[in-house]
C-alpha cells in the first residue's frame, strides 16, 4: 500500500510539472468551469470548455466532457491532465484549487450570487476566451430581453411579497442581494426575506410567520408539498390561499435559482405566477 501511495504521489507530481510547462494553443483557450453557471456562460459565448462540474446539466457542449468538481472537491489530477489554460470557479473553491495555482495553472474565482454577477462573469469569460465581442453581444441581448419582460410585469399589482423556499428543514431562503431576490423585484414583487442580510441563509420559523408572504416559490427538490400541512407552513397565508408555486422542470428551476445566461426564462415564469395573484 505504501508503494502504491508513493507511485500515485509521484505520478501527480509529474503531471503537475508537465502542466506547468504545457504550451497553450493559439486561438484555443482551454477552459475548465468548476460551477454550472460559469459553464453555461462559457458555452453561450462559444468558448472552448474542456471540463465541467458534476452538477452541470447535460446540455449541448457539456455532453461527454469530464466532470471534475463538486461543491466539496476538485479533481486536481484530472484537471492537470487536461492541460487547461484557465480554470474558473467561485471563491468558496479557493482551497480546492490551491494545488493548481502552485504549479502555475491560471485560476480565476468570481462571485455568482448576484444579478449583476451574470453580466460581469460573461464579460470576464469573454476576455479570458478572447471572445469579447460575443460576450458583449450576449449581454446586450439578455438585457434587451429583460427590459421587454419587465414591461409585462406592470400586470403585477401591489408588489406581492414572495418567499423563496430553498430548504424546509431547516428553512433556507434567498435574502437581500441574491440573484433570485432581484428577479422577484424585476417581476414586480418583493423578497419576503429581505431582512436576511446575506444572499442565502437559514430563516427561522418565527421570522417566516411574521413575514406572511403573499406567495411562495420553490423547486421540486425542496419537496415543499411534503411539509405544507405542518408548521410553520400551514399557518402562512400563501399556503392557505394556494399561492405556492413549484417550478415545473429542471430547466425553469435552474433559470430561476442559478445566475446564468438562461435567467430570462426564470423571470418569464415568475412574472406569469405573480400576475395570477
Image: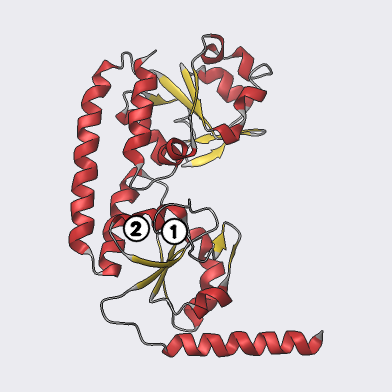
Q: Earlier in the sequence, mark 1 or mark 2?
A: 2
Q: Residue at x 20, y 34 (%)?
A: 147
Instruction: Determine the residue located farthest toward the right in the rendered image.
Output: 1
Q: Which residue is mark 2?
A: 43
Residue 232, image x, y percentages: 64, 19
Q: Locate residue 162, reporting x and y percent.
A: 44, 23
Query: Quadrant of residue 189 in the image?
Result: top left
> 78 above or below 267?
below
- How many angstroms separate mark 1 from mark 2 (CA)? 8 Å
Image quarter where the N terminus lies is bottom right
Relative to 72, 216 lies left or right:
left
Residue drawn 45% across the image and 54% down it? 36
Q: Position of residue 125 (x, y in %)?
A: 31, 62
Query: Measured along the vertical axis of the image, is residue 62 above or below residue 95?
Result: above
User: How crowded is the residue under tag 2: few (<14 C-alpha within 10 Å), some, or many (20+)?
Assistant: some
Residue 132, position as x, y percentages in the image: 21, 63
Residue 62: image tag:
1
Name the colouring of the figure: secondary structure
Amino acid at each position: 500500500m505504501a508503494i502504491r501511495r508513493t507511485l500515485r504521489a509521484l505520478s501527480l507530481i509529474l503531471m503537475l510539472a508537465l502542466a506547468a510547462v504545457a504550451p497553450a494553443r493559439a486561438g484555443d483557450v482551454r477552459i475548465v468551469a468548476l460551477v454550472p453557471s460559469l459553464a453555461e456562460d462559457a458555452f453561450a459565448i462559444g468558448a472552448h470548455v474542456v471540463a465541467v462540474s458534476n452538477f452541470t446539466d447535460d446540455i449541448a457542449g457539456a455532453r461527454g466532457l469530464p466532470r471534475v468538481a463538486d461543491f466539496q472537491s476538485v479533481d486536481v489530477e484530472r484537471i492537470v491532465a487536461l492541460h487547461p489554460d484557465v480554470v474558473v470557479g467561485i471563491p468558496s473553491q479557493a482551497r480546492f484549487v490551491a494545488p493548481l495555482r502552485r504549479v502555475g495553472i491560471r485560476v480565476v474565482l468570481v462571485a455568482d450570487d448576484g444579478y449583476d454577477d451574470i453580466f460581469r462573469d460573461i464579460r470576464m469569460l469573454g476576455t479570458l476566451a478572447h471572445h469579447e465581442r460575443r460576450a458583449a453581444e450576449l449581454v446586450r441581448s439578455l438585457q434587451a430581453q429583460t427590459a421587454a419582460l419587465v414591461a409585462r410585469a406592470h400586470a403585477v399589482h401591489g408588489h406581492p411579497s414572495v418567499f423563496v423556499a430553498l430548504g424546509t428543514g431547516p428553512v433556507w431562503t434567498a435574502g437581500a442581494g441574491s440573484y433570485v431576490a432581484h428577479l422577484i423585484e424585476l417581476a414586480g414583487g418583493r423578497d419576503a426575506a429581505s431582512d436576511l442580510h446575506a444572499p442565502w441563509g437559514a430563516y427561522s420559523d418565527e421570522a417566516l410567520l411574521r413575514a406572511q408572504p403573499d406567495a411562495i416559490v420553490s423547486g421540486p427538490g425542496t419537496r415543499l408539498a411534503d411539509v405544507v400541512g405542518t408548521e410553520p407552513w400551514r399557518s402562512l397565508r400563501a399556503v392557505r390561499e394556494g399561492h405556492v408555486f413549484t417550478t415545473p422542470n429542471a430547466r425553469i428551476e435552474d433559470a430561476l435559482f442559478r445566475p446564468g445566461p438562461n435567467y430570462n426564462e426564470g423571470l418569464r415564469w415568475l412574472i406569469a405566477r405573480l400576475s395570477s395573484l
